[in-house]
Image: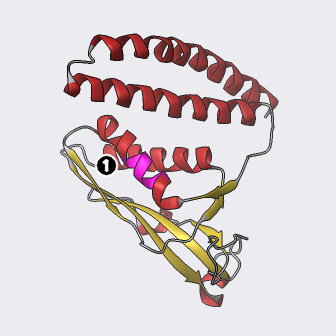
Amino acid sequence: MEAIGQLTGGVAHDFNNILTVITGTIGVLANAVADRPDLLSIAKLIDEAAERGAQLTKHLLAVARKQPLQPREIDANALVLEAAKLLHPTLGEQITIATQLSDSAWRALVDPNQLAMVILNLALNARDAMPNGGKLVLETRNVYLDDGYASLNSDVTVGNYIMIAVSDTGTGIPSIFWRGYSIRSSPPRKSARAPALG
């Protein structure tokens, strides 16, 4: 594990150096195409993707240094929308990205970089399963996982969760290998503050 940590740290460090060049020059590019809204929007996407890459690199370095994750309360819908925006140029025009977001989605206590990386990985797997194009759906929904579900999944405790689902119209995998994940949330409370999370 120590060797893997050192390798991860080295790759992350090199990747961070590459991102520094990108972020250092994107401003110059944006200024050069300021009179071309179509190109300026692409420059902005590159800048946002580089920033997300920098955050993921920071996460990799944290893993390499065995630092704990940094969970915080987030708006899951906002994170999913941001991920969708960054995925458009990555997945290509042949894949349509749709969102189905709950209007009353509870807030989640999670490391946002880790969650973004999971969504990205699932989306890239979905792209590979749709070589001729298709549809990717990102969904949020409040769910209650009961005793029956918990009895079949030993790492789950009964309670309220926010589900973040990534589905596609690709070839799929056998159901025996599929496993869903949810993020724990506490029941909503009648207050202006978002529901607390467990």
Q: Nearer the viewer, residue 198 or 107?
A: 107
Quadrant in which the C terminus appears: bottom right
Magenta stretch: helix, strand or loop mostly = helix
Seen at 20% across and 27% down, the residue is 38
What x and y, as percent, mark residue 122?
Answer: 44, 50
Q: State the residue position of label 1.
A: 129
Q: Amino acid at mark 1?
A: Ala
Q: Nearer the viewer, residue 171 or 62?
A: 62
Q: In the figure, is residue 40 to the left or right of 115?
A: left
Magenta stretch: give its range.
79-84
Where is residue 163 drawn, in percent x and y?
Answer: 51, 69
104 to the left or right of 188: left
Q: Is residue 80 magenta?
A: yes
Query: Please, what secondary structure does the residue beneath circle 1 have?
Result: loop
Specify the quadrant that holds the N terminus.
top right
Nearer to us in this view, 171 or 36: 36
Up/down of 6 relative to 171, above or below: above
Q: How many marks?
A: 1
Residue 25 in the image, given as x and y percentages of width and height: 44, 11
